[in-house]
Amino acid sequence: MQIDMTSLFKTVVAHNASDLHLVAGSEPQVRIDGRLVPLNLPKLTGDEVQEICYSLLTEKQKKEFEENFELDFAFTVPNVGRFRANYYKSLDNVAAAYRIIPSQIPSLDTLGAPAVFKSLIKREKGLILVTGPTGSGKSTTLAAMLNEINETEHKHIITIEDPVEFIHQNKRSLFSHRELGVDTKSYANALKYALREDPDVILIGEMRDQETIQAALTAAETGHLVFGTLHTNSAPGTINRIIDVFSGDQQPQIRAQLSTSLVAVISQALLPKIGGGRIAVHEILINNPAISNLIRENKIHQIYSQMQLGQQQTGMQTQTKVLQKLLINRIIDKETAMKYSNKPEELANFIRNL
């Protein structure tokens, strides 16, 4: 059976889906509002999936996949959009997951992002982390933040990604997009040399190891605004994750660096709304003298209490507070709120009195 990939990708975009899955023994399936939905197409054999998948690869990419059984890359379908792909093996058959990257880079206003985001990106230096599980919209939030800088500031912005997702057109700022395996060998290597490339802003696609985290902290300390991502579910949890990457004797130094270089942690999740669609929920931690002191003194467990104080004045917000507002306004239901809550007991008390 011949599947026209361009038509398939057009169908995915038309359904406003976020992902497309091709797995042997199943019809193609798409993710709409967080749920998998089979397309009305015949089931694919292993040979058919391989033929479809390989039609998008260069010879170099085929060789890499056949050697490693894993492959990440991004590509553009003319007049349709840009996609990120992951190829893997399932029961010795090729399988693929495609993530749709919006062709138009959204603005912070379009996303309905909290107002504090615009003040955070005006900082000259420091570390801003956007965290959350896979599929929570981290890349989109970061793209919107960089787009805001691009429209308002004259900066040199270096992105280091695996693969490059959003491709920004130069407006006021100048972009250097760097892709792992194509333009650089590793995040740590790219960060080391980025400091000699006169950047103002650096985006790190994923802070996945000790060397990369250390290089990011150094870059943030030496006068650069650094954006990074981590797969963590809460703002205080993000700080613990960074510190725990290092050995015990290194941790005091990392806490000291983090206490001075951290600007903010934005932890987000995408929740299904009543009636369809999804909404981003942001937990926001903004570093201030009190937070900095708690990080330095290894009192991370007290950070959440500090975040709860005077949220309107500080620009901080806890996830629970946002969920409460969405429940009151009937944007999400109680089951959804409890399912995604990182403080379910605290939220349950509120729901009982709702």
Image: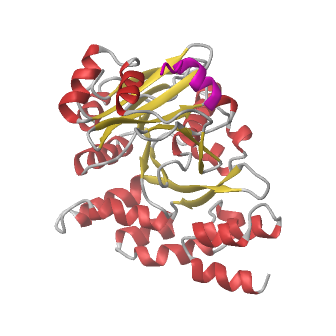
Q: Most prominent secondary structure in the magenta stretch?
A: helix
- Horizontally, is 181 left or right of 82 in the view? left
Would residue 154 be counted in the magenta stretch? no
In the rendered image, which quarter is residue 313 located in?
bottom right
**Residue, x 52% and y 28% (percent of image)?**
166
In the rendered image, which quarter is residue 45 located in?
top left
**Residue, x 56% and y 18% (percent of image)?**
6
Q: Position of residue 148 (x, y in %)?
A: 63, 33
Q: Position of residue 130 (x, y in %)?
A: 50, 50
**Residue, x 44% and y 59% (percent of image)?**
232
Residue situated in front as seen by the camera: 39 or 276: 39
The range drawn in magenta is 1-12
Question: In this figure, what is the number of numbered marks?
Answer: 0
Q: Position of residue 312 (x, y in %)?
A: 72, 65
Would residue 11 be counted in the magenta stretch? yes
- Horizontally, is 158 left or right of 245 in the view? right
In the rendered image, which quarter is residue 353 located in?
bottom right
Residue 145 position (above or below residue 287): above
Residue 51 position (above or below residue 30): above
**Residue, x 33% and y 59% (percent of image)?**
242
Q: Position of residue 25 (x, y in %)?
A: 42, 41
**Does any portion of residue 154 appear in the rendered image?**
no
Residue 242 position (above or below residue 208): below
